[in-house]
Amino acid sequence: MVSVATLLLLRHGRTTANADGGLAGRQPVELDETGRAQATAVGERLKGLPLAAVVTSPLIRCRQTLELALPQAEPLVEEGLIECGYGSWEGQPLKKLAKDPLWPVVQQHPSAVAFPEGESMAAMAARAVAAVRSWDALVTAEHGPEAVWLACSHGDVIKAIVADALGVHLDLFQRIVADPASVTAIRYTPLRPFLIRLNDTGGDLAGLVPPPGKRRRRAAGTTDSDAAVGGGAGVRP
């Protein structure tokens, strides 16, 4: 049985673009009133969690979310967590984009999509997964295998990271949901990742923190099944 760090993926709160039905991409859109309330509310859920590190996409909507949710934190910017580069699609209404011939490909075969003047979905997924796995290894090395850390990012980025954790193809990632201000939890064990929470918008997060001494008690002789490593919400390695 191996204890590992816990990654909390936080999506930013609702933005003006979300409310207006537009594709923000990497544009500097900010949280709207609802988004600010969501960020404050998730801050209450995160309060008291011993976060070993907080990292963020460089975009302002993520930084605003953390300013409201974790005002005492000093987030480190991670370029690998930035939103997908949608190129010429950025700033366009989703209703208009839905008529583009590329739209059904984005929905059904995203691994083949490269946005005009932008980034491919496969490249976005690869750099996002590489970023969180690298940070997870760093946090574990510096703070121990029972550390909890947080990364604030975007919907498609979080969905791609979750798809990788589940071992499913990127073409299936549109089946995953990451709502504004939701929390998703993943643990990367040596053999496989485990999805602990997905799109959690109201649950108690305290159960994600391993209790002191858990690792030592198991090392003393407790045996558990492999399923207990990831299990469901509240099951701790």
Image (cartoon, rainbow, N blue to C red):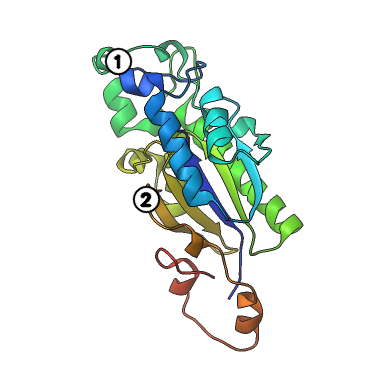
Task: Count the marks.
Answer: 2
Q: Residue 37 carries which label?
A: none
Q: Is residue 45 above or below residue 57?
A: below
Q: What residue type is labelled 2?
A: Gly
Taking 94 as reference, is 86 left or right?
A: right
Q: Is residue 23 visible?
A: no
The tag earlier along the polypeptide, 2 or 1, is: 1
Residue closest to the eye, 60 or 79: 60
Q: Quadrant of residue 217?
A: bottom right
Q: Where is residue 18 in the image (x, y as percent from the top left)?
A: 36, 23
Q: Secondary structure under badge 2?
A: loop
Work out how far the residue at label 2 is from the one at label 1, CA to CA, in angstroms.
32 Å
Q: In which quarter of the image is residue 177?
A: top left
Q: Name the residue under label 2.
A: 202
Taking 155 as reference, is 208 left or right?
A: right
Q: Which amino acid does label 1 sit on?
A: Leu
Q: Position of residue 173 (x, y in %)?
A: 37, 41
Taking 183 as reference, is 219 left or right?
A: right
Q: Residue at x 52, y 16 (%)?
A: 28
